[in-house]
Image (cartoon, rainbow, N blue to C red):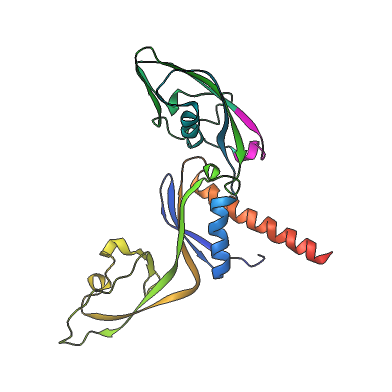
Amino acid sequence: MTDEFDVSFVTREDRSARVLLRGLTPATANGVRRAVIADVPTFSVDDVRFVENSSVMFDEMVGLRLGLTPLTTPLDDYEIGDVVTLSLQKEGPATAYSGDLETSDDRVVPADDDIPIVELKEGQRLEFEADAVLDTGKEHAKHQGGVAVGYRHLQRVEVVGDREAFDEPEPQIVRGVVETDDGEIVHTDEFGNDLTERYPDREVRVEDVPGAFVFHVETDGSVPVEELLVRAVESLQDRADELADAVAV
């Protein structure tokens, strides 16, 4: 992975982005996708010690919900296997939410405060202490910070002439992101995914742009989407360097 490639954001929101990468092979593009899912570590609850649980849920069910609660992850300050302690005390009638969790590190907190853990009725009580461990998605799906990751070829749309006068217009459906004749990057949602809406009475040709892929990445909030992508590419580079060193020996 010594070749350089270009990166530009097509859209960017708090937890999702569409990113255009040029200069990739299909194998490298799929490697980036897999690295986003499996290689970037996040904190997730791994062990729960219950002091009291008189709710209607078994301990294992509460533990499952805790394990699937995304936690913000400051990657620069922790290493794989590090542990942060969380705790909760709640008495009914009330609903215990993720925002009720207390943490030993204010940088490692629930990514969302309104995730329900369990509803407690009158007289019911929930108290526990839990260990959140830093690990990767290849070890367990609960550590996958990239919850939806996919990519498509960037397609170029070229106007080749006028439509024949008596031709009946038929929908020409494309999805994702396209590049126009003048180099503009356009998301197909803007014209309902139908090229006949953007280019009425025109004949167009659509082809894949070699080496250009548009990634759609969504994060659960544990890691910002930009950092998720950067860390994924760095992990690929590290493995490529490791392989090169092994071969050179």
Given the current orientation, which residue lies at the most extreme left position? 166
For image coordinates 17% across by 82% down, the residue present is 168
> Which contiguous range is marked in magenta?
75-84
Image position, residue 81 (x, y; %): 67, 37
Q: Is 165 on the left or on the right of 101, as rendered? A: left
Question: Does residue 116 lie above or below 210 as drawn?
Answer: above
Q: Quadrant of the C terminus?
A: bottom right
Quadrant for residue 129, please give it: top right
Q: Name the one closer to the observer, 101 or 19.
A: 101
Q: Is residue 77 magenta?
A: yes
- Residue 108 visible in the picture: yes
| Residue 141 part of the magenta segment | no
Quadrant in which the N terminus appears:
bottom right
Q: Is residue 24 visible?
A: no
Tally of numbered discs: 0
> Residue 204 location, x and y as percent?
31, 80
Residue at (57%, 37%) from the top-left corner? 43
As drawn, the residue found furthest toward the right would be: 249
Q: Position of residue 244 (x, y in %)?
A: 75, 64
For residue 27, which quarter of the picture?
Answer: bottom right
Q: Is residue 172 left or right of residue 85?
A: left
Nearer-the-camera pick, 181 or 175: 175
- Look at 21% across and 75% down and name the residue there: 200
Above or below, 144 relative to 194: above
Q: Position of residue 120 (x, y in %)?
A: 37, 20
**Looking at the image, is 9 positioned above or below residue 46?**
below
